[in-house]
Image (cartoon, coloured by chain):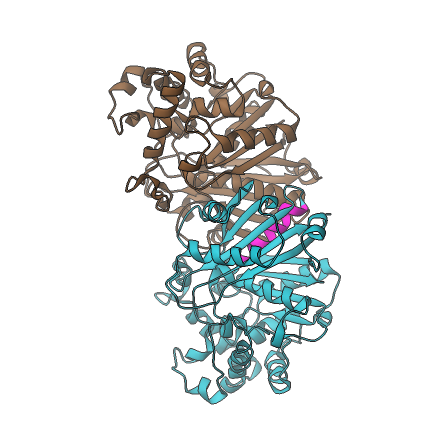
Chain colours: A brown, B cyan
């Protein structure tokens, strides 16, 4: 099978700006072309990932960016739209239908993807914070974890975000700040939540032959795992673990031929504080029930191994852009171009992106 | 490369019903599973094509249809969303990421994809009928074609639709009926237009190995061509031909190793009457300027070679379902299962699906 590389990246600051989705997409694509030697005529496909209700965005991005691709369309799957579009781009190249694919994700702060209208399992409580609250309560009870321990996730990730010039968060916070922030439910406070925002990120995928001509430091997609278990979280096998993440991570690591211990740096989908330890366990980066301990260790040692750009909580969460922004970060880490955020010697990276209470997950393994 | 087959099909009647998009998707998928021996556990990916603003439809369809796929997401590119999703399904299989992919398209009669909000080239005239009107005027002037000649398209296609139990149109019309139907613009009358409607169609794609186990009569996707030239029709190279269709058809026929003359049966994207002769020319099924003559010949000889199910004008045009419904028809034709609509001895078929004044086109070649 053709190997597939990440040959170039583009990203814009995540903000609360009232920017159009078309303009955000164009800006991150322009950043990608500005920072690479890519000939626009070489782009065979343009995939846009977003939850926006705007239609025909891939041809619009193509026209505004000066591209005339063969394939152009939008991919949507709520919060893991971005990695779904990347996996589609991978398959277009690995199948031989394309050599070079631009994958651009964007969202506005007022995205319609933030309200789960179809899932009536929580009655009229349609915002994701309500499922996160149930996961948090279940996780805390099962593993005797305190609110203060979970609060280390946002403290750590806001700290990391201070070294990410594109993050929406600019200031550090303490465990006390998290505990004193507004209580939204019994188990979730304001600072436990990632913030919806306006943002965009782009990535250029290329076949091995094309990548060699396009860039000096290709980063290879060596592992892909995806799983959809259901559409509503009440069908999850447990409220304190992430089944779709476990299955996707196993598949991605198997495909890449690696064990979780070999991962040097990872972007984890911390939509809410509790998601980070749950995902660490489900991916196998620590044992079941040890996620909060691993977070404490990362916190105490100031390790940047997990969510070096600040995760969703620190960077902001522009839904359709998030998975691509995660991959941009890991690419920069593997190229040793992550500036103050750099994890020394990072060689094997992982991206974990999920949707709707972990009913869908995507895991990617990237290597330089 | 792995060969990719259409192993099963499902479709529901196209109506003006107020059915939810989730229910329409499930009904056509259920029809597919009912009419085949497919084990639901074998489905590796579920791709939904639609212009609906509803989110997370692929996991919702998966859960309601009893599927737990690896990959699940929505594909949108206005009117050729359906064939875009099929091409993605093809690439997932040809790349080795999946063996069996369910592609389900659906739309409601009130789809938000029917108004082209981004394209300000016609000022406040945002409905597709206004670009179709300009194409019709340009085509008629360039090739000295009369309104009566173009009216043969809807007369022929409504006639075909009478033998399609899933078509929205149930009655034949005459050239006089078309000419006397309400004038919407100088060049387009009501009966020149395809009708927006509620509908759904599903197709199961499979690798060669999987297809052999799933069905007796696989139909192979032997040619794929796609092209996006722009997002707004004012950038088309001409108002009387379809550049994206020409490029996509050339690529698809080249990949399949066929000439246009070898095509036995074709579904053509007749969103408006003028689109059919323009597409026939751009695909190469007749010479430039000869589309109206070819339509007249088909009309006079009662040939069903073009749009045997009634095309978009006769069947109805549920945007995200249309490309898949076209592929379902060609599959039934190649399997000699098209009942009264059957084109005798059809062996090589073609699907032509496009968006937004032909700024994007997809062409597929199918063979038994």
Q: Main secondary structure of the magenta part?
A: helix
Q: Residue furthest bottom?
A: B176
Q: Is residue B344 visible?
A: yes
Residue appearing at x 58%, y 34% in the figure: A225
Q: Residue furthest top?
A: A301
- Left or right placement of residue B180 versus residue A336 in this view: left
Counting from the top left corner in percent of width and height, residue A272 is at: 37, 28
Q: In which image quadrant can residue A36 be found? A: top right
Indicate left or right for B45 with A114 as reference: right
Quadrant of the rendered image containing residue B9 = bottom right
- Does residue B93 belong to the magenta stretch? yes
Find residue A47 and report its horizontal and vertical position in percent: 53, 47
Is residue A251 shown in magenta?
no
The picture places residue B313, in percent across and down from the top left corner, at 49, 74
Q: From the viewer's perspective, is residue B186 above or below residue A164?
A: below
Q: Can residue B81 be seen at all in this image of the molecule? A: no
Which image quarter is the C terminus of chain B in? bottom right
Which residue is rendered at x = 62% and y = 87% of the image?
Answer: B300
Q: Position of residue A42 (x, y in %)?
A: 63, 47
Residue that protrudes farthest toward the right in the picture:
B257
Residue drawn at the location 47% of the way across and 70% of the way down: B316
Nearer to us in this view, B104 or B37: B37
Q: Which residues are magenta?
A: B81-94
Identify which residue, A32 or A320, lies in the foreground: A320
């Amino acid at each position: 099978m053709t190997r597939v590389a990440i040959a170039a990246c583009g990203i814009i600051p995540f903000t609360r700006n009232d920017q159009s989705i078309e303009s955000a997409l164009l800006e991150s694509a322009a950043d990608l072309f500005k920072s690479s030697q890519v000939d626009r005529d070489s782009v065979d496909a343009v995939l846009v990932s977003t939850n926006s209700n705007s239609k025909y965005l891939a041809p619009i991005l193509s026209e505004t960016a000066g591209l005339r691709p063969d394939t152009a369309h939008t991919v949507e799957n709520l919060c893991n739209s971005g990695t779904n579009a990347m996996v589609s781009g991978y398959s277009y190249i690995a199948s031989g239908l394309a050599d070079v694919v631009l994958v651009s994700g964007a969202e506005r702060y007022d995205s319609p993807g933030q309200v789960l209208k179809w899932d009536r399992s929580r009655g009229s409580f349609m915002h994701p914070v309500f499922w996160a609250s149930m996961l948090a309560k279940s996780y805390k009870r099962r593993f005797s974890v305190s609110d203060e321990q979970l609060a280390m996730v946002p403290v750590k990730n806001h700290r990391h975000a201070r070294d990410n010039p594109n993050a929406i968060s600019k200031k550090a916070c303490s465990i006390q700040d998290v505990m004193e922030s507004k209580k939204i439910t019994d188990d979730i406070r304001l600072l436990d939540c990632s913030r919806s925002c306006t943002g965009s990120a782009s990535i250029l995928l290329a076949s091995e032959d094309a990548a060699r001509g396009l860039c000096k430091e290709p980063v290879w997609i060596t592992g892909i795992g995806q799983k959809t278990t259901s559409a509503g979280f009440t069908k999850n096998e447990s409220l304190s673990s992430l089944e779709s993440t476990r299955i996707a991570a196993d598949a991605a690591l198997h495909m890449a031929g690696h064990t979780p211990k070999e991962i040097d740096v990872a972007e984890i989908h911390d939509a809410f504080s509790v998601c980070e330890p749950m995902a660490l366990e489900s991916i196998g980066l620590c044992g079941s029930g040890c996620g909060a301990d691993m977070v404490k260790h990362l916190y105490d040692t100031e390790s940047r191994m997990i969510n070096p750009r600040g995760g969703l909580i620190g960077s902001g969460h522009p839904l359709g852009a998030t998975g691509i922004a995660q991959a941009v970060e890991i690419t920069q880490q593997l190229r040793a171009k992550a500036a103050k955020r750099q994890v020394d010697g990072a060689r094997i990276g992982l991206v974990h992106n999920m949707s709707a209470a972990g009913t869908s997950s995507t895991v990617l393994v990237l290597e330089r």
